Image (cartoon, coloured by chain):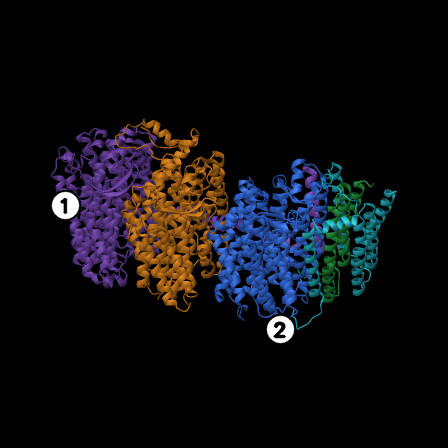
Amino acid sequence: MMTPPAVPALLAVDWWALGAVIALSAGALLLLLLELLPGRGSANRAAAVTVITLVAAAASVLRVREARRAIFGGMFVHDGFTVFFTLLFCAIGLVSVLISWDYVKRLRLPGAEYYTLLLCAVLGMVVMAASNDLITVFLGLELMSLALYVMVGFRRSQLESNEAALKYFLLGAFASGFLLYGIALLYGATGSTNLRTIAQFLSDSPLAGSALLIVGALLVLVGFGFKVAAVPFHMWTPDAYEGAPTSVTAFMSAGAKAAGFAALLRVAASALPGIDVDWRPILTGVAILTMTVGNVTALLQTNVKRMLAYSSIAHAGYVLVAVAAGGTEGNSAALFYLAAYSFMNLGAFGILALLGRGQEERVLLADLAGLGFRQPLLGLAMTVFMISLGGIPPTAGFMGKVYVFGAALQAGLLPLVVVGVLNSVISVFYYLRVTVAMYMTEEPAAGPVEVSWAAPSTLALLATLAITLWWGIQAQALLVAAQESVRGLL
Amino acid sequence: MSLTLFVAFAAMLVGSGLLVILHKNPVTSALFLVLAFCSLAAIYLLLGAEFIGMVQIIVYAGAIMVLFLFVIMYLNLQHDVERGVQIALRRGLGWLAGAVLAAEAVLLFARGWGVGPASTEPPPAVAIGNTQAVGLALYTRYLFPFEITSMILLVAMVGVIVVGKGRQRGEGA
Amino acid sequence: MSLPLLWIIPALPLGAVALNLLAGDRLRKAGTAWLGCGSVALAFAAAVRAVLELASRPAAERTIVEHAYTWMQVGDFRVDVSFLLDPLSAVMVLVVTGVGFLIHVYSVGYMAHDPSFRRFFLYLNLFMWAMLTLVLADNFLLLFVGWEGVGLCSYLLIGFWYERPAAAEAGKKAFIMNRIGDFGFILGMLLILAWCGTLEFKQVFALAPLVFAVGSAGVTAATLLLFLGATGKSAQIPLYTWLPDAMEGPTPVSALIHAATMVTAGVYMVARCHVLFQLAPLSLETVAVVGAATALFAATIGLVQNDIKRVLAYSTVSQLGYMFFACGVGGFGAGVFHLMTHAFFKALLFLGAGSVIHALSGEQDLRYMGGLASRLPWTHRTMLAGTVAIAGLPPFAGFFSKDEILADAFASGHYGVWAVGLVGAALTGFYMFRLYLLAFRGEPRLTPEAEHHLHESPPSMVIPLAVLALLSVVGGWIGVGAPFREGESLFARWLAPVFEGAREAAHAPLSAGAEWALVGASVAVAVAGLGLAFAFYGRSTAEPLERAAPRLYATLVHKYWVDELYDRAVVRTVYSLSQRLWTFWDEKVVDGAVNGIAYLMEGTSALLRLFQTGFVGTYALFFTLGVVVLLLHFLRHG
Amino acid sequence: MGDVSEFPWLSWLVFFPLLSAVLIVLLPATAERAIRRWAIAVVFAEVLFSLPLWWRLESANPGWQFEEKLRWLPALGASYHLGADGISALLVLLTTILTAVAVLSASRAVEKRAREFYAVILALETGMIGTFLCLDLLLFYVFWEAMLIPMYVLIGVWGGPRRIYAAIKFFLYTMAGSVLMLVGILWLYFLQKAVSGTPTFELDAFYALPIPAGAQTWLFLAFALAFAIKVPMFPFHTWLPDAHVEAPTAGSVILAAILLKMGTYGFVRFAIPLFPVASAALGPWIAALAIVGIVYGALVAMVQPDLKKLVAYSSVSHLGFCMLGLYAMNPAGFAGAMLTMLNHGVSTGALFLLVGVIYERRHTRMIADFGGLWKPLPVYAAIFLVVMLSSIGLPGTNGFVGEFLVLVGAFRARPVWAVFAATGVILSACYMLWMFQRVMFGPVTHPENEKLPDLTLRERLVFAPLLVLIVWMGVAPQPFLDRMQPALDRALAIAEQRLAMHSGGPAAAAISAAPAAAAPGAPTPAPGAGAATVADGSTTERTP
Amino acid sequence: MIPLPWTLGVSAVVFTLGVVGVLVRRNALVIFMSIELMLNAANLAFVAFARSMGSLDGQVFVFFVMTVAAAEVAVGLAIIVNLFRLRETVFVDEINLLKG
């Protein structure tokens, strides 16, 4: 079914399956074109176009969600995995746009460019998830990364934003070098960059001791490990997250991480089957380190944004637990967890984006003092997100952890699971600190921090809140989706 | 013959690469980088990748390095001042890490390393030049990545404009 | 039978408690008094009715069991709320309700001016309920309900004047001492339950001889533990120290609880369990020795006390010792007999003392009394009757019972115990007449204030005194046995069905001559004691012992420093241990470990933050190190 | 009331408070009176709703009643499965009553943020009732853990000066214990899946699942740690004094009366029946810890200067009795433990309420700040007296029945346990009476105490049901025993049956579900032999 | 014919030089140049493999990498220039506002 025709048949392409890619590219271009039109409120217009684009992309994928296609000579596959991640990225994009809508205006950032880059980043993510070839994986990753480098530095006159962009960029390029070298070695070891072909080659002539293969796979892993912020390739994360505009932090903490894992899972499952077992010690070690370093370092942070950055490192560790578990269960657990994580994290950062008036950014723990009772909805939502991030029921984060740890347990990784659950206890400490600040600390004499409410942000807040709670109470649909999605992979 | 040439160019590549990272003056570093790229282009030619070799000279040594030099000049950078314990420490660790990395690679590869199979694709019916072959591949099998690349360039353009353009419209922070 | 025979007896005072609680202050003083006394009077009537019913049956069938309801049942473990009336409990129930009623009446006068009049009767009625439950219980656990119930009431009544720190302290001390005994009691019950599978008296006593070999460890342990309970409740060595302190309570309380009824519960319990005790000779010996020791020990302390109530308290402890050693030598009947007579005369003495205190506006120190005979004629007369009775002069009640105890001790071959008892009898005569002489004879040494208010007590107080004085005189006559008349005494025959087993095991009767000799000896020592008292205190109030042997005197005045010893050895040890457990072990070690983990985490966090230098170079270095380590892994594990 | 079997009674019971909480949150915060009344109405309605668990519980039926089962996560095999038996029915009743009492008592104590306060308490009630009624382990864990949040908020927002420390400590400590239980649950789940092929979190399925003895130890430890921290057993108790001291009165009441019971409930429902081999093997250790807890809690309680801390440490002691009863592993011990749970809920709840009453008046809980309170507060003192007596287990009050049954059970298991545990009888009198003496007796030492107002009518109403329960359960505990026993017997029977699957081990003898009835007249062994059995400390069950 | 190990060896050396350059230099521009060295090392490996396997894929890959590198350079230099505008420095060890 997936054997590519010898002669590329352009007309044989299922355009619907490519719908998301086309929609996103077209949307990005359209945004740039629209900028030529005169008129005020271009930021609103751009945001609206972005929303439409993302909805269209999602809709086109949904329309053919049952289809299974390999397009462009098998470089782009449309399968359950692609559908799952495309929808997830579109949703992340949508929520991010809603979060950014007012934030971009408030900070007077150039709207059209912002949303163009956002769409391009989403496009890169989609390509990463859908790629069945190391070339496209690499290009998708670079597309996403380049867009994000710029987005991180979007507040260009602000020192922190610029510094974050520089660090993210330099280290990202550094990591790209490793990834690229890894791809080169894999290519050398197997003679192809197509994942299926690699897998086929490996199954025909196993190269267990091949240095090329091992080092290549390792460097590829390192490259993805950088994107998902796995220890010790995580050190850019807190700085980049803290310095970036909050809406960008929200977007990249959910999207880039999910995309990194999508690519990692795709490559591991499609090209290197069995790697989850062979490389379990490494994955286990990295997962343990990632969880622990992320959580422990977060303990003493006073900047919520930075704290959540460390928390996102820890969450990468939890997903790595699922990756280490491997198999259908492990992979679907990873998907489940990423979906759950994305929304609660978006919600949490979305709330941070609300804080402060005008161009000020109030994201210190102390800024939250007394906020909970002043802003009941905001307080409640933040509490739910924190609880969910901490993995406490009845929230999506809890179900995610149950699923992830269950998968790991099934794979016999008991020590990893024990470390994982203990880590979630550690993490609860700093998540609780947020609620302590909001509900149990007297608000400052000057009054609590001001909240820049806007309809789109509120909508984003309610949506993420609802999803976080709903997946905690009834996650059947997501469970099934996650399980179905990985089936085609293996 | 080609082997001799290879060795010569390889030596030039490594030597200039070394000078890139060693030389105090960023302009000199950049110039040595150009030299490294040129030697690399020569190696590409030796390896039968004419197209890539040309592109290497045009794009890398030409466009990219000009950009680098332009920026260095623009910023009017002088010699890097590198001193102090911290820097010495970092250097030491850097070289150590590099050495260990290389040693590990050597040890791993010394155990044996399999190279992938020869290409399975049928040799082209008519003997065509390397440039033509690459071009054909680019616009047929590699159409999709090619398109993605265009988006990457678009992002780069937009990005450079965003980051690089001057302050305007009372844009804040 | 229209009314239930037995459970109505404890229910009556309990009903009064409930009414008292519900009615609250609307009841006024008169109502409270009527309610309190009336309910006890009715209980007495009900008790008489029940005992008559019992007496009407043939001797062998004299047990009435009345089942109220199942209290708890878990698997094979079942305890009922059911009541038992047999000759033994009949004696108890009559004494408790009878003496109790008199004391209730007395209290109406004694407490008339107390603002907490209602509360007093509430407690008193509650006590009656608990005491009646205790004596009527059909099983160990229900007995234990009464047992602890009386302890509670004792606690509440000792601390009745709660504003006095000493009273509160004494109440607590009493309760905790009792609890130490109860610890033994509970374990004893558990042992019995484990062996016999039930706690019901009849079944336990029927099974015990089958289950336990004589002298076996099980029954010895069980009985010793039960006896530990008894030492708590009945103020025996080593748990006796609470009783003298309990004198902080109002005097009617001392009379009712700490003389006539509650403190005798231990004796009752031992008598009730005589089947078990007889299976454990070691336990019986222990009971005898502890009883005799307490009798002597408390009597010596009583010699030098100046507080009128404390003299009586030590006397009570001493007399309770007599009862126990009676039981210990197998004379359960004698013990119970002494219990009854003691209830009469000791209640009388306490009430009389109360009358004196009342008259002297609260003065309790013998050194500030004297010459009261003429001023308080009724009190004087009745007190004299009580004093003679307790001193054991014929034909007063105490003579017969004490004589029987000594005879039993001698006859059963416990000569040492007998000798101790004899010495004790002499001491009793001495300290009681010392009290009498110091209080009623000689020159008045009253404080002006006491002098001013001095008056004879009202009839509600005097009448009970008179009744009790009468009982102290004639109460012993039902127990008159050898050598004064042929065969067993009326009292012994009444109790015979209960103590059947005991009698079989008992000694052979003494010859008449020996009996007379024993009587003579006990009368002689009593007379000697009182004679000595007259010699010392007839004219002067000085303490001869203080001059003769000051250190001995000090030892006695300080009660052998036992309280101090307990305080040092137990109370302070436990307290400082607890303090250390809390401040060091709990806070530093256990909780310190918990917080230590938190500190460790924070420390690690601070350490990890140091790596996050903010420099790209550092980040890249760690990145590279990561790659190096991963490669190393493959180098090692291929 | 309609047909109970038709109506989803338990779901209603679980979620009615939560729904009401949502309604409360939607009300404007200024409508304090309305909120208060509504909250009180809700908790009392909840008491009424829970009454069918008393009336309609079929005492003879040991199985699940009022059962409800819906698909929840078919992909995992988890279902929404509620059901009650005698154990959970009584605990739910305790929950509804104590919550009602706590809410009623709080109506004056809570000065700020009343709306949120009531919403949180109602949410907490949902969590507690849900925990007791879940028959699906995943669902159980959801409730078990979710319940931490409202309690945390309750302590953290409305607590005393160190409330944040206490709240976080409470949360982290209990969570640290329970996450390992989650691992255990998942482990069980996969074992079950491997054995039967169908994934499920059903408790009944796990009851039927043979678990290898080696795994049992680890699983048991995972479960037991979670429960032991919640109980809390020595040495996992140090969160309790902090949480109690800092929590507002209503929080302390609920924490002591109900939350702690979840630990013991967990042992009865899960740890013992699921892992009988490990339970039997580790039982002596747990019993030893329980006994240490009894004595240690009492000793430390004795020297506490703070009333709430004193009561908190007394809880450690009381729950030691509970655990000892459970690990006696016989009917008497179980019944005693279960009764002690209820008793402790009632009496310690009442004690915290009482402390709350004076705290409200004086804003201090230090024993040294009081003295002679009987005079200004006679009614208060009298109620305190009764509750204190119940707490120290005076016969005639509820405390005694439970304690004695525990001792009976413990004695039957190992006499020496009972010996040590019985010292608690003495020590509890020591710390309670001494405290009572210092607070109530003596002259009024602080002038500000002289004019304290006695209990109001509302406060008397708060205590009335508790006093009734204290007396009722002390005088006539049989209705309670009747209801709990079939369920307890079932738990024991399951444990025994599962133990029999691993037969042959020495542990098999340690549990005896139905001890040989030492009925009167039954043939008796030679006394000497019996004495020897006592002496060597092993079982004293007499076998005919 | 150039043996594959030779080319690969050169590629590895150049890659390592790039890595070391990133680690030892403090000038952001030089660091960036070192990264370019790494990319070129990868490219060399691609071409070498392509050559040894007689396949074109490697060369095509190199083409894409060059494009990406160009884009990266554009963006990266823009960021560095902006940094210099704000801070008057390109030394990465003078840039640590964000840390901890």
Q: What is chain C's hue in the picture?
A: purple
Return the x and y of residue C205 as percentages of the image width and height.
Answer: 25, 33
| In this picture, residue A428 sits left or right of residue E6 | left
Q: Quadrant of the C terminus of chain D?
A: top left
Q: Secondary structure at mark 2?
A: loop
Label 1 Cα neighbours within 10 Å, binned few <14 / some 14-19 / many ≥20: some
Q: Please give the chain letter of the residue carrying mark 1.
A: C
Residue under the image location 26 percent in, 36 percent down = C273
D104 or C29, which is in the foreground?
D104
| In this picture, residue D137 sits left or right of residue B64 | left
For marks 1 and 2, give the one nearer the viewer.
2
Q: Which chain is orange?
A: D
Q: Quadrant of the N terminus of chain D?
A: bottom left
Q: Secondary structure at mark 1?
A: helix
Tell me how far mark 1 sits from mark 2, CA to CA.
111 Å
Residue under the image location 26 percent in, 50 percent down = C537
Q: What is chain B's hue in the picture?
A: cyan
Inspect the image, locate mark 2, and give the three-letter code of the amino acid beneath it.
Answer: Gly
A198 or C320, which is in the foreground?
A198
Residue under the image location 25 percent in, 50 percent down = C127
Return the x and y of residue B2 as percentages of the image width and height.
Answer: 86, 43
Q: Which residue is mark 2?
A: A39
Inspect the image, locate mark 1, and give the three-letter code of the amino acid beneath it.
Answer: Val
From this view, report whether residue D285 is shown above or below residue C159.
above
Return the x and y of residue A469 as percentages of the image width and height.
Answer: 48, 55
Q: Which residue is mark 1?
A: C48
Q: Which chain is blue?
A: A
Return the x and y of residue A386 as percentages of the image width and height.
Answer: 52, 56
